[in-house]
Image: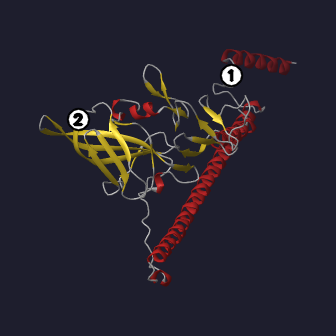
Amino acid sequence: MSLKYNIVLVWAICLSCKVVLTGCEVVLVNRNVTDSFRVGNDGCKNNASDSVCTSLATCQSDGSCLCRGSKPNFRNPNITVDGGLKYDDSYGCVSSEHLRFGVGFVNYCEFGPFQLIPSSHQDSTTTFTDINNQNVDSKRCALQKAWVKFPDNAAEMELQWLNHSYVDLTVFNATLDFRWKRSVPDLRGTIITLHLACILEYSGSATFVSKCLRAKVLGTWSADAVSVPTEPTVTATSSQPKSSQITTEATSSVTVTTAESKSTASASLDDESPDLSKVFIALFSISLVVILALGIVVVFLWKKMQRMKDNNLRMTGHIYEEPSNYEPLRRNPLQDQNDEHDYQSLTTSQKGK
């Protein structure tokens, strides 16, 4: 294999990786009653040959793919039915019931339906029902642990910071009303799974059971953001401006709301700046590591080709070497005696003359 061929092979591998990352990757997911998603920077195109939207999504004019019909929820990887619920090899649109069941017995959630919930504590409650046990008398439920599914991660991640201080759970018989006590903007566009410990009553006796609730969070997730389950930053409210001290009650409330919104907006901008810088540093570091790795590979292949070239020259060069079993010619001792006798006879005859 020549050095030129190796370099071309490495270049082709890098080019294919770039195409996969930029052309086929889901870069944006918008969670709503019906989800939409965007594939690659260019998105989809309205023609018959385009297939990035999958068979259960429709290409929109803005380049996004909109789930439709009985499968309004985006998931990566997709969940298909093949002798049971299984994960697919790629993204796709999934029905709400399949998302509530999940893949495997441990992923099944009793509370349903799988539905959209807000991310703000200011929104109203969302009602769930224990679908398989609607006649059960539930007293109360408490959050044990929470998991999140980001669109760019195949597996769920545990949210260690999301505890009972974030959720408000009101239980009445088989009905559970859910709302946030604290807003969770970092979870927009994700799918969350809440594992609960509930107290049930059967014939006057109480028992503890584990139950599950799964939902999608309203909002947009973007691949530009880092999908790490970090704890949301609590924004401190600044002191009220002097104008808010006017005695008129209506004017005062409006002024305070404006001050809080400006403070929250400025704080969110300040939070986004470090995230963008971290993403830039991470991308630069990855690029540098890839360049160094390619340089090492090229140098290694070049040295290998030089050694092969030197070996070929040694094999084809006309250099005479004595064989290891070489022995000089030796005369026969009997032949030496005959020659000496002939010499003496010749000498004697010459002297007689």
Q: Which residue is mark 2?
A: 136
Q: Which of label 1 and label 2 is nearer to you?
A: 2
Is there CB contact under 8 Å for labels 1 and 2?
A: no
- Label 1 secondary element: loop
Question: At label 1, which amino acid type do we have?
Answer: Arg
Q: Is residue 184 visible?
A: yes
Which residue is pictured at 75% across the width and 17% down the height?
A: 339
Left or right: 251 with respect to 316?
Answer: left
Along the line of sight, which residue is nearer the eye, 277 or 310? Answer: 277
Q: Quadrant of residue 192?
A: top left
Q: Where the C terminus falls, by quadrant?
A: top right
Q: Is residue 189 left or right of residue 109?
A: right
Viewer-closest of 136 and 286: 136
**Element type where label 2 sits in the image:** loop
Residue 49 position, x and y percent, is 73, 29
Q: Is residue 190 above or below residue 260?
A: above
**Residue 22, relative to residue 285: is it above or below?**
above
How many marks can you see? 2
The N terminus - image quarter: top right
Residue 202, picture quadrant: top left
Q: Is residue 53 visible?
A: no
Residue 277 point in image, percent of width and height: 58, 63
**Badge 1, how many Cα within 10 Å: few under 14, some, many 20+?**
few
Spatial distance from mark 1 to mark 2, Cα to Cα?
114 Å
Residue at the extreme right of the image, as rendered: 353
Query: In front: 83, or 65?
Result: 65
> Which residue has dot 1 on it?
330
Which of the marked residues, 1 or 2, is nearer the chain's N terminus?
Answer: 2
Q: Is residue 166 above or below residue 209?
A: below
